[in-house]
Image (tube, coloured by chain):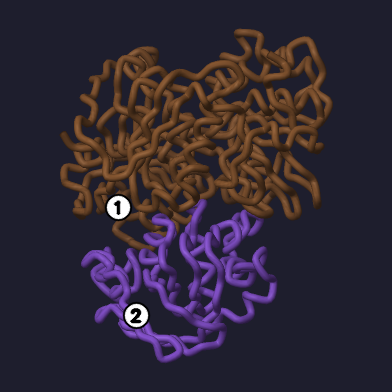
Amino acid sequence: MRGIGRAVCLGRDIDTDLIIAGRYLRTKDRSVWAAHALEDLDPALAGRLSGAVIVAGGNFGCGSSREQAAIALRDAGVVAVAAPSFARIFFRNAVNIGLPVLECEIPCRDGDQVTFDLEEGWIEAGGIRRAVSPLSPRMRAILAAGGLVPFLCGGPR
Amino acid sequence: MSTLSERILGAGAGAYVDRAVDRAYVHDGTGLLARAAWTEIGSGVFTDPDRRYLIFDHIVPANTSMTADLQQEMREFAAMTGMHFFEVGAGVCHQVMAEGRALPGEVIVGADSHSCTLGALGAFATGVGATDMAGIWATGGTWFRVPETTGIFLEGALSGAASAKDVALAYVGALGMDGATYRALEFVGEGAVSLSMADRLTLCNMAVETGAKAGIFYADRVTRDYLAGFGIAAEQQAPHAGGYPDEIAIDLEDVVPLLALPPRVDTVCPVAEKEGLPVDQVFLGTCTGGRYEDLAAFAALVRGKQVAVRTVVVPASRAVLMQAVSTGVLADLVAAGCAVATPGCGPCLGAHMGVLGEGEVCLSTANRNFKNRMGVGGEIYLASPMTAAATALAGAITSPEEFL
């Protein structure tokens, strides 16, 4: 799976409350989550997420198990999230809903073009290519299917 | 001998295993998304309903018509699937599960990050998201990566004004917010054996705040006695005989009352360093600090006095509330001026029942103090129930040592 996007650079320890605040969770209108993604970090960020590769510091997605955090980013148009380390529940949730996560160290600036290949295990930004920690075969298969639901249903629909 | 995670999951650290899930639970928040994903899977198969639980705890009773409607949908879903359903007032999911619904050696998964709480009973217990839960409902199991383990060696015994919550803040501060990412924490040593089940639940609860997927105590005599109280006969577990690749040691004798400063749970300092900082609210409750022992410790300090600041008390479960009623602890809390609310999560997640206003400061016995968590613009200091009591009496951050 190959992808391309524009870097949106964030710091470390971005918790799931910052990604989507608890006050927005109780709704059936899923568009609310994307509209308010990362609002408590920076209210202007949600508008910049379409076509973005988030490049964050370590421990991205720490905190709550709320899957709405991964859904909010995916639905806001985030192509992938790259970080040196992820909180494990967020990492798993992202794969389960079909949002690529790349465990890697990649220096980069806001707006840089970022390309990556999950199968080959690399990410490239500003002319620098770095290796990405490989996902387990099961996680790769789930991501390739587009998430756990299509995976359990027998592949992409 | 292997670590407990390796024994329960049946493979060495780093291996990927497929495992049946012994027990799985969701709450009113995560249950909704899990139901949507399960419906999308479309098989109509719901495995082991007798070992699946829906526990209303996050916004109880409902705060808006929308929440009420969503909760009604979940009630209907529980009735349709035949899983166990715990209505408004039962308590926080982790506490309800800890009351005789989690056993040593089991694989337990909850759709809530603090599901690691149940490792206190010698189970491998961890949090997952909603889609993972839907898959578990549909197939009966899931995959796990067997974690490496960090050993937390506890020596000595707690005394004076220090409590299990202070030990939890001590290890979170020592490891940092990602110091145990993807790992399991095992609490071992003579100090671990000396701790009550309430203390163990509090220590395991905060494992996820270091990035760990599980926090674990080996089932021993304390575990057996605790479960016997629920009419359950449980086996003890032989402790891990080898060393750990990573370990830290904490002498319980040295632990003093601690605070985690907003907005990071790993920015920890002695309460004494912030003494006198005014607070607007004290919150006693949650899956970290809302057990009977926590309420009793709080009541012991405020009995016969009046709190100087608004104080919200939310028992962690109906059983906790009942015990507080029968021992007089509840009367002490109410007489001291505390507002006591329905068992559940209370204001911890910032949805209702004590949310903070802009610029307000809360001293809380919960496990998280992230920015805006308990209300936009509020600040949360995390501390033990005894520190909460001293602070409630003074209206400003105060060490419990002054009241002992």
Q: Is residue B121 visible?
A: yes
Instruction: Give the amino acid at mark 2.
Output: Arg
Q: Which residue is mark 2?
A: A130
Res. B79 visible in picture: no
User: In the rendered structure, the residue with mark 1 lies on which chain?
Assistant: B
Asked if the residue under mark 2 is in contact with the one under mark 1, i.e. CB atoms within 8 Å, the reply is: no
Left/right placement of residue A23 relative to residue B189 reads: right
- Relative side of B357 to B263, left or right: right
Question: Considering only vertical position in the picture, is B157 above or below B129?
Answer: above
Residue type at mark 1 is Ala
Dot 1 falls on a residue whose secondary structure is helix
Chain A: what color? purple
Would residue A22 be found to the left or right of residue B111 on screen? right
Q: Chain of mark 2?
A: A
Residue that appears at 66% across and 54% down: B371
The one nearer the camera, B281 or A67, is: B281
Measuring 57% from the left and 30% from the top, which residue is drawn there? B289
Residue, disc 1: B138
Q: Which chain is brown?
A: B
* Residue A59, horizontal then vertical, whole percent: 46, 60
Residue B37, given in percent of the width and then of the height, sits at: 40, 60
Residue A55, given in percent of the width and then of the height, sits at 49, 75
Secondary structure of the residue carrying numbered label 2: strand
Identify the image quadrant of the C terminus of chain B: top right
Percent from the top left, x then y, of residue B31? 47, 49
Q: Is B232 placed above or below A103 here?
A: above
